Amino acid sequence: MKNAFKDALKAGSPQIGLWLGLANSYSAELLAGAGFDWLLIDGEHAPNNVQTVLTQLQAIAPYPSQPVVRPSWNDPVQIKQLLDVGAQTLLIPMVQNADEARNAVAATRYPPAGIRGVGSALARASRWNRIPEYLHLANDAMCVLVQIETREAMSNLASILDVDGIDGVFIGPADLSADMGFAGNPQHPEVQAAIENAIVQIRAAGKAPGILMANEALAKRYLELGALFVAVGVDTTLLARGAEALAARFGAEKNLSGASGVY
């Protein structure tokens, strides 16, 4: 079994991604052909469930873009379901410490390495038991990315990085800036200093640093510092701002002002 996204991170090859929040397989397939290395299917803030994640995985599958799935929480039951429908790379939100990171890894591994329940006869991931030795191969194909989004998580970064099975650490600038007292302002100098220090620390530990940043200059700065998986836009934002710009060119008034931030 292969995981092209995991292999790329191991090789130190920067991966450029796009966030999917429309929760729709048709738009997911449209964007799978746009040329991004990876697409994030968001189950934390977008209106997704296991069924909608499944249809988006199916839509993306024929294309080179690699799917990354974010569950709503570090929940072993939800993680098990997402893995069974075919997710291989998970972005686990709000991981605060090494114990929570270990729990995330354990949820993705079959025993004795972890606690993932065996239901391969029902699982798309095993092609309904048509993949020989799936139960023995699956663990190595899993890619676990954990999100650090608070001052507490930042203070525990070194111990999180020591957890075996963590492939990458994603810095959540929106929640981090809010936790630091600068809600809506991830570009505040103190937030930026924390982000940059974390990227360097993560890369030095041999893990892949990741982040979401739609500001092109900052995204390129993070890549220069060693970030290896960087999402540079969000489908909902691209659609909304593009539609507003088109309407404005034909004289329509913009009724809502966009807020500054990560997206």
Image: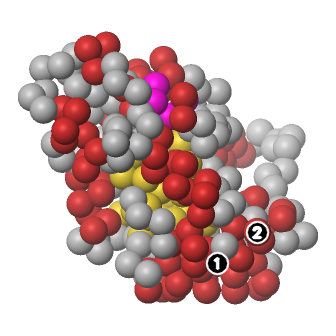
| Element marked by disc 2 | helix
Q: Nearer the viewer, mark 2 or mark 1?
A: 2
Separation (CA) of disc 2 from disc 1: 14 Å
For residue 239, say whether it is visible.
no
> Quadrant of the image for the N terminus?
top left
Q: Residue at x 75, y 59 (%)?
A: 175
In the drawing, does residue 224 fall left or right of residue 93? left
Pointer 1 residue: 195
Residue 2's place in the image compared with 193, above or below, is above
In the drawing, does residue 15 fall left or right of residue 248? left
Asked if the stretch drawn in magenta spans residue 80, the answer is yes
> Quadrant of the image for the C terminus?
bottom right
Residue 61 is drawn in which quadrant?
Answer: top left
Outermost residue toward the left in this view: 132
Pointer 2 residue: 152
For residue 119, say whether it is visible.
yes
List x then y, in percent, for residue 73: 64, 40
Which segment did they paint magenta?
A: 78-82
**What kind of residue is marked 2?**
Glu
Q: Residue at x 27, y 68 (%)?
A: 10
Q: Earlier in the sequence, mark 2 or mark 1?
A: 2
In the drawing, does residue 237 fall left or right of residue 260? left
Outermost residue toward the top in this view: 122
Residue 130 is drawn in which quadrant?
Answer: top left
List x then y, in percent, for residue 254: 81, 44
Q: Residue at x 41, y 64 (%)?
A: 164
Badge 1 crowding class, 10 Å Cα cut-off, few under 14, some 14 to 19, many 20 or more, is: many
Residue 144's place in the image compared with 78, above or below, is below
